[in-house]
Image: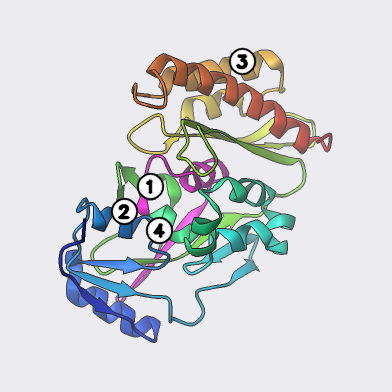
């Protein structure tokens, strides 16, 4: 199937791109990697009247270490995240998860920021971003907004961008000492969407108690799901198998899986329980320097 007719623009500067987006409003969409948008257009699940191709814009393809955060620009590809030394050193959870994104063809073309903006509940990046507490930088002709990822992911394929805005970067807190994480993903075959994905992240204080916790789920709710109740259960407590089992039970109870070709709902709920517990143990081992 072919997409409906649309206008196409390839601006050469960010200012020109923002002017175009302000002009077309809700009818415009940003094109970066196109690995999600173009298939949806071919299936006529999306029908933007105007595509604004940002691939020629300078300054959006870098990964930088700034003010305690890793900044990932709008044109950084999934494959870049997987191999970047700054990410490996200061955001190892992202580096470890990047090879699980889709397949090599998609990783070489698709962008992290595009995936974040797409808000597909079966996408991996937003679960990771929810677990580590990332922020999204939205830019328009009027200026820049910094949006916590928990506020940015609104609903099924729905983000918090306003008409005329685009995501120009995602900022991830640097993983300090006594920090660990894991992303566990069940898929039917390499490159498939997750049947279930669980991102976990822990930071320990000097006494060994849990100072910060992040748990987020993929493919088991209408959006990537941050399990706040389980996180609050963990913070301030001494890590233990019993505590992790309790948090995993909360995650399994909170998720909203549906039965489909990838498996029945109760099976997915059981995987959430197992992966949450397993992921927390891996995160703890890494935080203690045992992994």
Secondary structure, mark 1, is helix
Which residue of the protein is positioned furthest toward the front in this rendering? 1
Write down the residue under mark 2. 160
Left or right, 182 with respect to 170, comes to: right
| Disc number for residue 270 | none
Labels 1 & 2 near each other (Cβ < 8 A): yes
Can residue 197 be seen? yes
Write down the residue under mark 4. 35
Q: Earlier in the sequence, mark 4 or mark 2?
A: 4
Left or right, 283 with respect to 129, comes to: right
Write down the residue under mark 1. 151
Whole-number angstrom distance, CA of label 3 to CA of label 1 = 28 Å
Nearer the observer: mark 3 or 4; the answer is 4
Q: Earlier in the sequence, mark 3 or mark 1?
A: 1
Q: Residue at x 18, y 64 (%)?
A: 26
Return the residue nearer the eye: 28 or 155: 28
Q: Earlier in the sequence, mark 3 or mark 2?
A: 2
Labels 3 & 1 near each other (Cβ < 8 A): no
Q: Residue at x 26, y 71 (%)?
A: 51
Secondary structure, mark 2, is loop
Q: Residues within 10 Å of mark 3 (few under 14, many from 20)?
A: some
The correct choice, above or below, for 57 with respect to 272 in the image is: below
Whole-number angstrom distance, CA of label 3 to CA of label 4 = 37 Å
Q: Earlier in the sequence, mark 3 or mark 4?
A: 4
Let me know if residue 120 is in the magenta part: yes
Whole-number angstrom distance, CA of label 4 to CA of label 2 = 21 Å
Q: Residues within 10 Å of mark 1 (few under 14, many from 20)?
A: few
Q: x, y percentage for residue 1?
A: 21, 55
Write down the residue under mark 3. 245
Q: x, y percentage for residue 141?
A: 30, 77
Bounds of the magenta span?
A: 118-145
């Amino acid at each position: 199937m072919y997409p409906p007719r649309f206008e196409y623009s390839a601006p050469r500067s960010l200012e020109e791109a923002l002017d175009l987006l302000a002009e077309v409003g809700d009818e415009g969409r940003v094109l970066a990697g196109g690995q999600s948008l173009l298939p949806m257009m071919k299936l006529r699940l999306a029908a933007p009247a105007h595509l604004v191709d940002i691939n020629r814009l300078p300054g959006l393809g870098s990964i930088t270490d700034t003010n305690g955060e890793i900044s990932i620009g709008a044109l950084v590809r999934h494959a870049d995240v997987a191999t970047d030394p700054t990410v490996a050193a200061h955001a190892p959870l992202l580096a470890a998860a990047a090879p699980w994104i889709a397949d090599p063809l998609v990783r070489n073309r698709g962008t992290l920021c595009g995936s974040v903006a797409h808000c597909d509940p079966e996408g991996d990046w937003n679960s990771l971003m929810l677990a580590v507490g990332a922020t999204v930088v939205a830019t328009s002709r009027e200026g820049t907004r910094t949006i916590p990822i928990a506020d940015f992911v609104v609903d099924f394929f729905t983000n918090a961008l306003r008409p005329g805005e685009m995501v120009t970067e995602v900022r991830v807190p640097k993983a300090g000492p006594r920090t660990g994480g894991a992303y566990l993903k069940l898929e039917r075959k390499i490159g498939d969407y997750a049947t279930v994905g669980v991102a976990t992240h822990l930071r320990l204080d000097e006494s060994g108690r849990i100072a910060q916790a992040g748990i987020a789920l993929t493919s088991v709710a209408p959006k990537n799901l941050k399990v706040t109740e389980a996180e609050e259960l963990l913070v301030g407590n001494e890590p233990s198998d019993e505590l992790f089992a309790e948090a995993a039970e909360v995650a399994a109870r909170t998720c909203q899986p549906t039965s489909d070709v990838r498996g029945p709902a109760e099976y997915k709920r059981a995987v959430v329980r197992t992966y949450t517990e397993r992921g927390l143990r891996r995160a703890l081992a890494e935080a203690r320097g045992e992994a």
